[in-house]
Image (cartoon, rainbow, N blue to C red):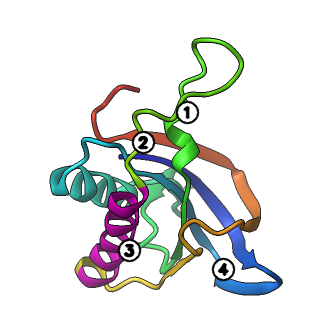
C-alpha cells in the first residue's frame, strides 16, 4: 500500500459538481493499493499515517499527530501511485491492485481509521473522476510505502 500524506489547512473532493468529502485542519491521504497488499499493509499504513508527528507543538516543533490536534482525514483513492515510469513514457500500472480488490481495501482503510481511532474521515468516490482542492500547510508532504520501498 502506498500513500502520499499532506498536512492541510483544508481540503475537499468534488465529483460531478458535488462535494463528496471535506475537511478542515488535518491530513489529505492519496491512497494506492498494490496487487499483493494484505491486511497487515493496510494496518501498517493507517497506523503510520495517524501517528505521524507532523503538526507543530507550542515550541513550533513537528511533534504532534493529527489526533493530538483534533484534525480530520480526507482519503482519496489514487491507483497512479503504482505507476512505474522507468521504461518509456507511458507509466505501467501492473503492480496496482485490480479495481475490485483496490475498492475493498480502500473502504477497509477508511473503516479502520474511523473504528480504531474515532477520527472524522471523509473520502472521495472510488474510480470517479475527482477534483481535489486543498491548501498544503507548510508545505508538508510525505510518502509511505507498506513494503518500505521508499
Counting residues from the N terminus, which is met first, the one under dot 1 or under dot 4? 4
Left or right: residue 40 versus residue 52 is: left
> Which residue is tagged 4?
24
- Say few, some or many: other residues with alpha carbon within 10 Å of mark 3 (under 14 / 14 to 19 / 20 or more): many
The relative height of residue 84 versus residue 11 in the rendered view (above or below) is above
> Which residue is tagged 3?
110
Residue at 51 percent across and 51 percent down: it is: 62
Report the span colored magenta: 99-115
**Quarter of the rendering containing residue 105:** bottom left
> Which residue is tagged 1?
83
> Which residue is tagged 2?
96
- Say few, some or many: other residues with alpha carbon within 10 Å of mark 1 (under 14 / 14 to 19 / 20 or more): some
Counting residues from the N terminus, which is met first, the one under dot 2 or under dot 1? 1
Q: Secondary structure at mark 3?
A: helix
The relative height of residue 83 versus residue 34 in the rendered view (above or below) is above
Left or right: residue 18 versus residue 55 is: right
Counting residues from the N terminus, which is met first, the one under dot 3 or under dot 1? 1
**Quarter of the rendering containing residue 63:** bottom left
Contact between marks 2 and 4 (CB within 8 A): the answer is: no
Counting residues from the N terminus, which is met first, the one under dot 2 or under dot 4? 4
| Eye-nearest disc, 2 or 4 | 2
Residue at 62 percent across and 27 percent down: it is: 91
- Measure how far apart labels 3 and 2 are at the Cα level: 19 Å
Residue at 32 percent across and 52 percent down: it is: 45
- Measure how far apart labels 2 and 1 are at the Cα level: 8 Å
- Measure how far apart labels 3 and 1 are at the Cα level: 23 Å
Percent of width and height locating residue 98? 39, 51
Q: Secondary structure at mark 1?
A: loop
Percent of width and height locating residue 147? 27, 34
Contact between marks 2 and 1 (CB within 8 A): the answer is: yes
Amino acid at each position: 500500500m502506498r500513500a502520499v500524506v499532506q498536512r492541510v489547512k483544508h481540503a475537499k473532493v468534488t465529483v460531478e459538481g458535488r462535494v463528496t468529502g471535506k475537511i478542515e485542519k488535518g491530513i489529505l491521504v492519496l491512497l494506492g493499493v498494490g496487487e499483493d497488499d494484505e491486511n497487515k499493509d493496510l494496518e501498517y499504513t493507517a497506523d503510520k499515517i495517524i501517528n505521524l508527528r507532523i503538526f507543530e507543538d507550542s515550541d513550533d516543533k513537528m511533534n504532534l499527530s493529527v489526533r493530538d490536534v483534533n484534525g480530520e482525514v480526507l482519503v482519496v483513492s489514487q491507483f497512479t501511485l503504482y505507476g512505474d515510469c522507468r521504461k518509456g513514457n507511458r507509466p505501467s500500472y501492473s503492480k496496482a491492485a485490480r479495481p475490485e480488490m483496490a475498492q475493498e481495501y480502500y473502504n477497509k482503510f477508511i473503516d479502520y481509521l474511523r473504528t480504531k481511532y474515532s477520527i472524522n474521515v471523509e473520502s472521495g468516490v472510488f474510480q470517479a473522476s475527482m477534483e481535489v482542492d486543498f491548501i498544503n500547510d507548510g508545505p508538508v508532504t510525505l510518502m509511505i510505502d507498506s513494503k518500505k520501498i521508499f
